[in-house]
Amino acid sequence: MPRDGTAREPEHQDDGDSGRKKALIALAVVVGLVVVSIVLLHVLKKSSDLEDCEMQGRTNCAPLDTSK
């Protein structure tokens, strides 16, 4: 208690919601990074497979589009 007799209120009262929000935001960021990483790995793997096929001298590396 200060000398002037007035009680100070805490500068920041954290009821847990702020920490929970921060944790959820951090979790969302981590999940987003994981999803982006998985998509990127898939694209790079596909590109690598096509490049390996072409480097072997094959002429039928790209899949044919038969949806027409």
Image: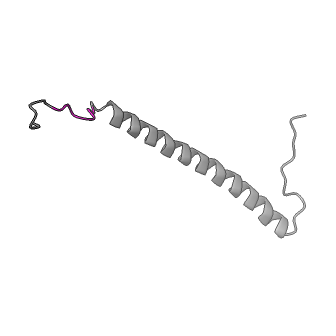
- Frontmost residue, 62 versus 24: 24
- Identify the residue shown where x is 34% and y is 37%: 19
Count of numbered circles in the view: 0
Q: Position of residue 56 (x, y in %)?
A: 83, 70
Q: Which residues are magenta?
A: 8-14
Q: Is residue 45 above or below residue 39?
A: below
Which residue of the protein is positioned furthest toward the bottom in this rendering?
A: 56
Q: Nearer the viewer, residue 58 or 2?
A: 2
Residue 53: x %, y % from top left: 80, 64
Q: Quadrant of residue 46?
A: bottom right
Q: Quarter of the image containing the C terminus? A: top right
Q: Position of residue 6 (x, y in %)?
A: 12, 29
Viewer-closest of 36 and 8:
8
Determine if the magenta segment contains residue 52.
no
Q: Residue furthest front?
A: 4
User: Where does the N terminus fall, quadrant-wise?
Assistant: top left
> According to the image, what is the colour scheme of the structure?
one colour
- Tell me what residue is drawn at x 87 percent, y 64 percent: 58
Please name the residue shown 70% across and 56% down the image: 44
- Identify the image quadrant of residue 45: bottom right
* The quadrant where residue 61 appears: bottom right
Q: Is residue 16 above or below residue 57?
A: above
In the picture provided, is 1 more to the left or to the right than 56?
A: left
Seen from the viewer's position, the closer of residues 31 and 49 is 31
Residue 21 is left or right of residue 15, and the answer is right
- Which residue is rendered at x = 39% and y = 34% of the image? 21
Q: Position of residue 67 (x, y in %)?
A: 86, 35
Dominant secondary structure of the residues highlighted in magenta in the image = loop
